[in-house]
């Protein structure tokens, strides 16, 4: 019996906007339209009593129900709870992201029928904990997340497809090195990639998970608010709905300034109203330091890849914020090359994810994949050790950042006492020598070491990063084959039981069109 193959679906779960794409019958990626008729869905959640509203309608409610609105929940992944209560209740960021994904699932299923297997994208700069949290959000939404893929890599794959690197006849254009500059609403990612034959190889990656268009909006909000304070001695940011309205106005004004040289932002609060003129030059000045941060990171990444601008064939612009003219001006000045706008900045990431989904589905079906992706890890992996001299905790790096994935490393821990039955290894990610400044992946505990081991028995702990940056750990007594049972306690992750109950809850409280 001929079974219809499942659709290859990729989801770009963005900080401010999300998008879903699938491959059409000819194998070309296409963006699916949501229930409102748009190609992108604002990643905004309104929890209104028993009703949950996602997307455009939730954005509209920012002017009236700001206290019940969650935006930029992606920025809080890796934390136990979203930073703000909604209707008196705290939600883990995975649940909010799960609701967004659930809407995307329902809207897309209405068009292409039921499916459950997806690829979800993550910023290249996401650490292990945030990667897991993204997979968990997919689970909460009722998906089976086949894989996560880095956003800049996905954009490069979409670009490669467009450029004819995945022709069925195997012919490919000449090898290219590209720099992907992805400035979205909440995160900034930069990745240097080499595309050659059917291989997409990341050479170096860096970024900032707390830098994006949203910070440019905030500068405008502060500029208007300060003007308002000067005139009326009142701060419009104090009142949540006024702030919500002002944020929307400022985001809109920012878009206008990408097209025009000046704009006017209106602000009303406590019976006073004001109009504030802003020119593009003024806007550039008040956000110059933000742009400089991206320039610095871009240069660092190029250096980490051991390349100069002469080696780079294309600079690929991804993410809505690259529409700001200052971005391409800065990159052109830095590199001496005009950036490439050939992929859609809003859709490329979802398209690349759909292409990756099709690669995985064909691999499951036993076919040979059309292309290969090789990534690097974005943060160094380490364990907490004790400094011999100072006796203070320090990070012992086992896998430095920008190592090609998959990769593994091992470390030997010695038992302190005879007949010691347990060891505890604290795993971190980050570049700081002091573990508390790193991201806490979790505590790996082994509780059933074989009885009767002498003191100083070497215990081997092996760390393995998969191609997608997820970590697994294997523990053995050195020189033996038997794997010892261990448990990784993750402070900032949901347990399987919690995930199941959120999955159940989200399916019962589906997003409504208000
Ligand atoms: P993310 O993936 O982080 O959600 P996107 O790539 O969808 O982000 O980009 C969204 C960001 O792009 C928002 O901050 C939005 O304000 C900004 N943006 C979209 N269009 C423009 C424009 N024309 N000018 C300036 N910024 C824009
Ligand atoms: Mg994005």
Image (spheres, rainbow, N blue to C red):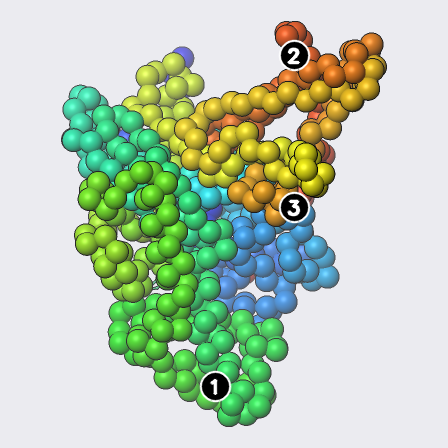
Label 2 crowding class (10 Å Cα cut-off): few <14, some 14-19, many 20+? some
Neighbor class of circle 3 (other Cα within 10 Å; few <14, some 14-19, many 20+) is some
Q: Nearer the viewer, mark 1 or mark 2?
A: 2
Q: Quadrant of residue 169?
A: top left
Q: Residue at x 36, y 45 (%)?
A: 301
- Of labels 1 and 3, earlier in sequence is 1
Disc 3: which residue: 436
Q: Position of residue 260 (x, y in %)?
A: 26, 74
**Residue 396 appears in the figure:** yes
**Residue at x-position 65% and y-position 60%:** 84
Residue 462 point in image, percent of width and height: 59, 21
Q: What residue is shown at x 60% (from left), y 55% (from top)?
A: 52
- State the separation of the CA atoms marked 3 and 2: 29 Å
Q: Secondary structure at mark 1?
A: helix
- Counting residues from the start of the chain, the first of labels 1 and 2 encountered is 1
Camera-near label (1 vs 3) is 3
Among numbered discs 3 and 2, the one appearing first in the sequence: 3
- 462 shown above or below 7: above
**Label 1, label 3: how many angstroms apart (C-alpha)?**
40 Å
Q: Which image quarter has ligand 1? A: bottom left
| Res 227 label | 1
- Residue 173 figure quarter: top left
Q: Which mark is residue 478?
A: 2
Q: Give the camera-side residue of 514 and 457.
A: 457
Residue 94, visible in the rendered structure: no
Q: Are marks 1 and 3 in contact (CB under 8 Å)?
A: no
Residue that appears at 68% across and 34% down: 388
Q: Residues within 10 Å of mark 1 (few under 14, many from 20)?
A: some
């Amino acid at each position: 019996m001929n079974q219809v193959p499942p659709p290859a679906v990729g989801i770009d779960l963005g900080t401010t906007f999300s998008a879903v794409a699938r491959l059409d019958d000819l194998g070309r990626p296409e963006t699916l339209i949501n229930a409102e008729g748009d190609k992108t869905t604002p990643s905004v959640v309104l929890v209104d009593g028993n009703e949950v509203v996602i997307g455009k309608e939730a954005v509209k409610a920012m002017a009236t129900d700001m206290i019940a609105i969650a935006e930029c929940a992606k920025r809080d992944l890796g934390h136990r709870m979203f930073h703000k209560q909604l209707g008196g209740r705290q939600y883990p960021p995975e649940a909010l992201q799960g609701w967004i994904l659930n809407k995307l699932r329902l809207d897309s299923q209405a068009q292409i029928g039921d499916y459950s297997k997806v690829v979800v994208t993550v910023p290249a700069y996401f650490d292990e904990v945030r990667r897991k949290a993204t997979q968990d959000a997919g689970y909460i939404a009722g998906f089976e997340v086949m894989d996560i893929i880095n956003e800049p890599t996905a954009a490069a794959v979409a670009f490669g497809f467009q450029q004819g690197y995945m022709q069925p006849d195997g012919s490919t254009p000449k090898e290219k090195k590209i720099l992907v500059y992805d400035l979205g609403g909440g995160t900034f990612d930069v990745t240097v990639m080499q595309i050659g034959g059917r291989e997409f190889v990341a050479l170096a990656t860096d970024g900032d998970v707390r830098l994006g268009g949203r910070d440019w909006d905030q500068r405008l909000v502060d500029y208007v608010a300060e003007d308002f304070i000067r005139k009326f001695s009142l701060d419009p940011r104090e009142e949540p709905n006024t702030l919500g309205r002002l944020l929307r106005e400022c985001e809109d004004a920012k878009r206008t300034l990408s097209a025009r040289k000046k704009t006017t932002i209106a602000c009303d609060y406590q019976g006073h109203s004001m109009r504030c003129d802003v020119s593009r030059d003024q806007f550039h000045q008040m956000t110059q330091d933000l742009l400089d941060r991206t320039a610095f990171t871009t240069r660092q990444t190029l250096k980490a890849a051991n390349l100069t601008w002469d080696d780079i064939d294309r600079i690929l612009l991804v993410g809505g914020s690259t529409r700001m003219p200052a971005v391409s001006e800065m990159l052109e000045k830095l590199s001496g090359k005009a950036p490439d706008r050939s992929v859609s900045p809003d859709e490329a990431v979802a398209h690349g994810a759909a292409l990756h989904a099709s690669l995985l589905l064909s691999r499951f079906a036993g076919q040979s994949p059309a292309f290969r992706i090789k990534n690097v890890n974005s943060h160094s992996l380490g364990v907490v050790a004790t400094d011999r001299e100072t006796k203070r905790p320090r990070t012992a790096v086992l896998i430095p950042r920008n190592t090609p994935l998959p990769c593994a490393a091992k470390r030997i821990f010695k038992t302190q006492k005879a007949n010691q039955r347990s060891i505890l290894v604290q795993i971190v990610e980050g570049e700081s020598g002091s573990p508390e400044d790193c991201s806490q992946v979790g505590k790996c505990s082994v509780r059933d070491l074989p009885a009767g081991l002498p003191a100083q028995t070497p215990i081997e702990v092996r760390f393995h990063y998969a191609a997608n940056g997820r970590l697994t750990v294997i523990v053995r007594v050195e020189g033996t084959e038997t794997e010892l049972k261990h448990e990784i306690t993750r402070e900032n992750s949901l347990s399987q039981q919690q995930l199941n109950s959120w999955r159940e809850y989200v399916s019962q409280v589906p997003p409504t069109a208000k």
